[in-house]
Image (spheres, helix red, strand yellow):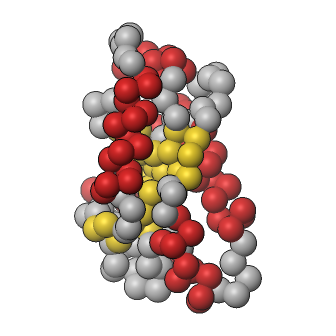
Amino acid sequence: MKMNNSSDFDLDLFFKTDFLFLHVATAGLQVNDEIFFNSSHNDFRNLLKNISLTPFQYKLNPFLQEIISSKRETNTNFNFEFYIADFIKYAQLGLFSFDRTFINNNEDNNFHLVAYPILDDSYNMLINHIYGINLNLDYNQINNIVTGFIHDNLNRSFKWSL
């Protein structure tokens, strides 16, 4: 019998919506069996590593310093640059990258956005590689919508059921 010991790990999970790609670091969250035993997360990570695209420019969540202030309070050796490195790596691959906010309780499912890509024509190439379709999108408009959404809705942590 398989055992779900996801709370023992900081798992990197990957999700695809119609046209957005997400990375979620679980930081010891107990995730459900359907997610824990699903190999699609590793498959998607491997796919991303093998795509040859120019790295995306990225932005950090403008509220990140405030959101992670509790991490600094509980860990005096907290290193911000080290903390954001993996999230930036995934944003440069075209993913919106999230972390669990309160790691002291492995059942708390509050997450926050850490880093996200600035979308450009490379995103069309990423979508083409993954879905086999071409989109002609106005990335300036999309980036304005994404930035507005982040400022209006993702400026704090939020609950996410995994």
Tell me if 3 is positioned left or right of 11 in this view.
left
Quarter occupied by residue 18:
top left
Q: Quadrant of the N terminus?
A: bottom left
- Give the residue at x 44% y 79%: 102
Residue nearest the viewer, comparing 67 with 125: 67
Tell me if 96 is positioned left or right of 142 in this view.
right
- Give the residue at x 56% y 69%: 65
- Give the residue at x 39% y 18%: 138
- Give the residue at x 49% y 63%: 63
Say if residue 156 shows up in the picture.
yes
Query: Does 28 appear above or below 140?
Result: below
Could you tell me residue 26's position as x and y percent?
A: 45, 65
Could you tell me residue 160's position as x and y percent?
A: 29, 63
Could you tell me residue 88's position as x and y percent?
A: 62, 49
Could you tell me residue 135's position as x and y percent?
A: 36, 13
Quarter occupied by residue 82:
bottom right
Query: Does 62 appear above or below 48?
Result: below
